[in-house]
């Protein structure tokens, strides 16, 4: 039997939920609004929270359709639900995400007093994922990709735009959502600076290379020519990177272009925007830049998010030591 579409699950929850579940239903909608408006999460992250909380609510409704759970059952509800998930054929990463989503949702429910603070026991086991080291691209590989990008496009405009995107992703380390969100006035060419709006609507200054700025000067007339060829409503578009219709380029379009470029270049691993961000951080650390400075450049709130890049350096040092030291393997 094919899985039930999420829309029909939403309808099922709306029409069939028992009265006792209504407060949790209202709390879920407010929780999703809070994540969207106040936390300003990306639409991908927001969709994950929406789907995960919906799955939990439907499970509760289906298992307690005729009578409300008692105080003890409510307290153990998170553990019961995670036990249910553990019996499904879900990956470890999916289980970890759903566990984290549930904890965030129920913590919000109690904090906002939809239920008393002690209603749900949130001290449940959360699957831990093995920490994987991010891959990164060599400068030679990036140079090859930059050279190849224009050859894959039908128009000079799109080819040079995509080449610019590669140069900016690598030289600035910004996220793809930050890249497509750039406006023309975010650039300060004299200082080689970008005003970037990152996660949580936090602003920071990022930097771009002289090579990017030189290519940008050559490309901007093509951008202006594209706008002039379109209806008047598009002529004042302020977004830096535009699609062929004169609209702001989407992050999905960047993902598609990079996946296509990676295949055309014969890469074994999928090419994606974050790979350039990993490469940016790794090259800086390999050349002696302090971790705290890399944290600032990446826009990480916590230093722990940046520390994974030090593991790459440690592995390289270990390899060099084992290869070179005469007593390393004795």
Image: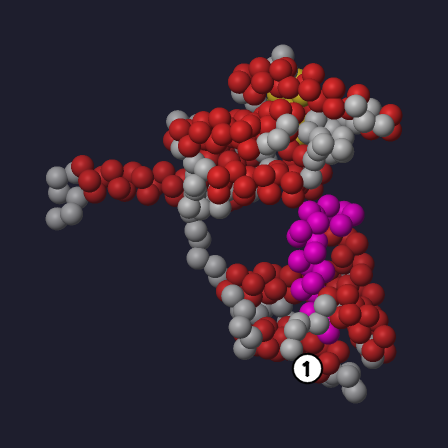
Render colour scheme: secondary structure
Where is residue 302, by image quadrant? top right
| Percent coordinates x, y for residue 210 in the rendering | 54, 16
Closer to us: 218 or 71: 218
Residue at the farthest bottom position: 66
The part of the chain drawn in magenta is 36-58
Q: Nearer the viewer, residue 173 or 289?
A: 173
Above/below status of 298 relative to 124: above
**Magenta region includes residue 230:** no
Q: Residue furthest front?
A: 154
Identify the residue shown where x is 62% and y is 24%.
Answer: 156
Left or right: 161 as drawn, with respect to 18: left
Quarter of the image for the N terminus: give it.
bottom right
Does dot 1 land on a helix, a strand or a loop?
Answer: helix
- Neighbor class of circle 1 (other Cα within 10 Å; few <14, some 14-19, many 20+) is few
Residue located 63% across and 75% down the image: 81
Q: Is residue 246 visible?
A: yes
Q: For residue 107, which quarter of the picture?
A: bottom right
Where is residue 90 shown, x and y percent of the image?
54, 69
Q: Position of residue 325 (x, y in %)?
A: 16, 38
Is 57 inside the magenta-drawn segment?
yes
- Circle 1 residue: 72
Does residue 60 lie above or below 128 as drawn? below
Q: Nearer the viewer, residue 64 or 279?
A: 279
State the residue at coordinates (48%, 39%): 264
- Give the percent coordinates (x, y) of residue 148: 49, 30
- Residue depicted at 62% across the width and 31% down the height: 154
Examine the residues drawn in magenta and state their main secondary structure: helix
């Amino acid at each position: 039997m094919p899985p039930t579409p999420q829309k029909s699950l939403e309808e099922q929850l709306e029409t069939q939920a028992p009265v006792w579940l209504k407060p949790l239903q209202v709390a879920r909608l407010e929780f999703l609004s809070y994540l969207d408006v106040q936390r300003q999460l990306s639409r991908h992250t927001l969709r994950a929270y929406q789907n995960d909380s919906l799955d939990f609510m439907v499970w509760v409704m289906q298992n307690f359709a005729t009578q409300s759970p008692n105080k003890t059952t409510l307290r153990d509800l998170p553990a019961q639900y995670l036990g249910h998930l553990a019996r499904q054929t879900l990956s470890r990463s999916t289980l970890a995400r759903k566990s984290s989503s549930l904890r965030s949702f129920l913590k919000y429910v109690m904090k906002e007093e939809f239920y008393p603070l002690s209603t749900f026991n949130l001290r449940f086991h959360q699957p831990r994922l093995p920490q994987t080291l991010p891959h990164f691209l060599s400068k030679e590989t990036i140079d090859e990709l930059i050279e190849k990008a224009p050859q894959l496009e039908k128009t000079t405009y799109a080819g040079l735009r995509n080449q610019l995107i590669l140069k900016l992703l690598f030289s600035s380390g910004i996220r793809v959502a930050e890249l497509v969100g750039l406006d023309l006035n975010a650039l300060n060419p004299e200082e080689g600076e970008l005003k970037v709006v990152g996660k949580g609507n936090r602003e920071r200054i990022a930097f771009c290379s002289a090579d990017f700025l030189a290519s940008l000067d050559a490309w901007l007339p093509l951008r202006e020519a594209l706008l002039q060829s379109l209806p008047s409503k598009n002529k004042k578009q302020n977004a830096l990177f535009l699609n062929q219709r004169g609209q702001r380029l989407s992050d999905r379009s960047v993902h598609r272009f990079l996946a296509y470029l990676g295949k055309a270049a014969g890469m074994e691993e999928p090419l994606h925007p974050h790979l350039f961000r990993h490469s940016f951080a790794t090259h800086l650390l390999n050349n002696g830049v302090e971790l705290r400075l890399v944290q600032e450049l990446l826009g990480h709130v916590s230093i722990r998010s940046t520390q994974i890049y030090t593991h790459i350096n440690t592995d390289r040092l270990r390899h060099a030591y084992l290869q070179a030291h005469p007593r390393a393997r004795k």
